[in-house]
Amino acid sequence: MIGWIRFGLTAVFLIAGLVFFAGGAAGYIRFGYSLNRIHAGGLGDTAGLFFVLLALAFSAGELMDILKLGLLLLFMWSTSPTSSHFLSQIEYYTNTRLYDHVEREESKEDENGSC
């Protein structure tokens, strides 16, 4: 009986993770602006990874495997948003057409008359 409950929870969390991955991929394809694409990919990746690793933790059963998956989750949760932030900073500083979408701090300083 416990095995079927673990199987059911694993299936539910795995499907939820795949839905988040698919939503992130659909957002990446659907959005036209690059910062929106980075945001959709980062959120889909982070939430999808959480649910997939939670499903794997339920199916693993052993404590050491669960701890390894937890460490993997912490590592990925710290590196995935960092890489998304780095990509958005590259876009922010290198895209010259960004003035149509984002108000930069330099433009506020220029309006006030300071250098």
Image (spheres, grey):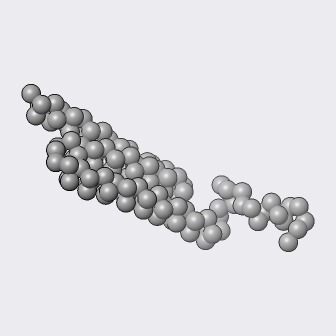
Residue placed most toward the observer, 53 or 23:
53
* Residue projecting furthest to the right: 113
Residue 74 in view, yes or no: yes
Vertical side of 60 occupied by 103: above or below: below
Residue 28 in view, yes or no: no
Q: Position of residue 13 (x, y in %)?
A: 27, 39
Residue 3 relative to residue 83: left or right? left
* Residue projecting furthest to the front: 63
Q: How many marks?
A: 0
Residue 75 relative to residue 5: left or right? right
Q: Position of residue 103 (x, y in %)?
A: 72, 57
Residue placed most toward the observer, 36 or 10:
10
Q: Position of residue 3 (x, y in %)?
A: 10, 34
Q: Position of residue 98 (x, y in %)?
A: 65, 62
The N terminus sits in image quarter: top left
Residue at 84% over, 65% down: 110
Residue at 38% over, 52% down: 45
Residue at 24% over, 43% down: 55
The C terminus sits in image quarter: bottom right
Residue at 16% over, 48% down: 62
**Occupied quadrant, residue 74:** bottom left
* Residue projecting furthest to the top: 1
Residue 105 relative to residue 10: left or right? right
Vertical side of 99 occupied by 52: above or below: above
Residue placed most toward the observer, 65 or 59:
65
